[in-house]
Image: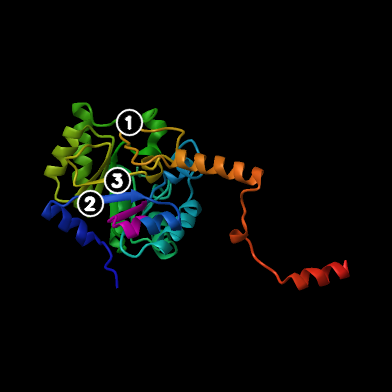
Amino acid sequence: MTKRFTTADFRKAKKENTKIKMLTAYDYPTAKILDEAGVDCILVGDSLGMVVLGYEDTTRVTMEDMLHHIKAVSRGVKHSMVVGDMPFLSYHMGAYESVRNAGRLVQEGGCQSVKLEGGEEVLDSVKAIIHAGIPVMGHLGYTPQSVNVFGGHKAQGRTLDSAKKLFEDAILLQEAGIYALVLECVPYRLAEFLSNKLDIPTVGIGAGAGCNGQVLVTSDMIGLFRDFTPRHNKQFVDMGKLLSEAVDKYIIEVNEGVFPKEENSYTIDEQVIDELKTLI
Ligand code: KIV
């Protein structure tokens, strides 16, 4: 049986100074490929809203959207830890509601852990979810669900006050019992400082190489989502271009009758056709 990457492996990675490799997935085939490639952790991120559902930001993503995609990803994964993102407003209406929603992602969706954004303001929810036996991954820095508060996609923690707040929130989350912390769009010197100060591992996106692991939005790193490319992204392959080229070829081949060939078709006994002709 394949061993699953667990919260204990997150701790071990930090202790042994091995980098944690995390990517997002939203569907069964992609999840299967990432899992088989050996990614430690697959995040069903609410980036789903933009890169799959075509929304402007993550605030439109619902529990039902997340559940639908977490279920698909979970079916494709054997080794990686699957983390389900808690969508906007699913953990802001008290501990009871937060545990209920986190519980749905695990119980109905099949993920092993949940991620939620924010520090001190969501601490009660974090504690309640962990108390219920669900591991929580934190998320600080640029937290996309607060895009309307930030006034756009901006790096966070650049001033002394905001760097201090980030540090204090990270400590509070660690004390509350989170097993790992995503740092998004945080200056790399600050992310490195936080990673060295914290006992739990940090996973960076736009936070430099000093984090204990890295995460990217898969649709960005394979060039499939083309509306907006964040500065921190590295495109490892241009799947958008490959897909366009494949579709162009398909259109030409269908127009010219090159596709389908006999090998792409199903056969029938000629006698059946002959008999059919006599009937109609
Ligand atoms: O939703 C998401 O994909 C995320 C990553 C950017 C960490 O939260």
The residue segment tinted magenta is 34-43
Place of residue 68 in the rendered image (x, y in percent of width and height, measured from the top left): 49, 56
Q: CA distance from mark 3 to mark 1?
A: 14 Å
The residue lying at 27 percent from left, 36 percent from top is 206
Task: Give whichever of discs 3 and 1 has the lower sequence position.
Answer: 3
Q: Nearer the viewer, residue 130 or 184?
A: 184
- Does the image show residue 82? no
Residue under numbered circle 3: 215
**Three-letter code for the amino acid on which mark 3 is drawn:** Val
User: Above or below — where is 190 with respect to 24?
Assistant: above
Q: Nearer the viewer, residue 92 or 160?
A: 160
Q: Does any atom of ligand 1 lie closer than 8 Å to the CB of label 3?
A: yes
Q: CA distance from mark 3 to mark 2?
A: 8 Å
Place of residue 202 in the rendered image (x, y in percent of width and height, measured from the top left): 21, 46
Q: Which mark is residue 264?
A: none
The residue lying at 44 percent from left, 64 percent from top is 108
222 in the magenta segment: no
**Three-letter code for the amino acid on which mark 1 is drawn:** Arg
Q: Which mark is residue 231?
A: 1
Label 3 element class: strand
Label 1 element class: loop
Residue count near mark 2 (Cα–Cα under 10 Å), binned few <14, some 14–19, many ≥20: many
Task: Give whichever of discs 3 and 2 has the lower sequence position.
Answer: 2
- Does the image show residue 256? yes
Q: Are marks 3 and 2 in contact (CB under 8 Å)?
A: no
Counting every numbered tag in the picture gives 3
Place of residue 187 in the rendered image (x, y in percent of width and height, measured from the top left): 22, 32
Q: CA distance from mark 1 to mark 2?
A: 21 Å
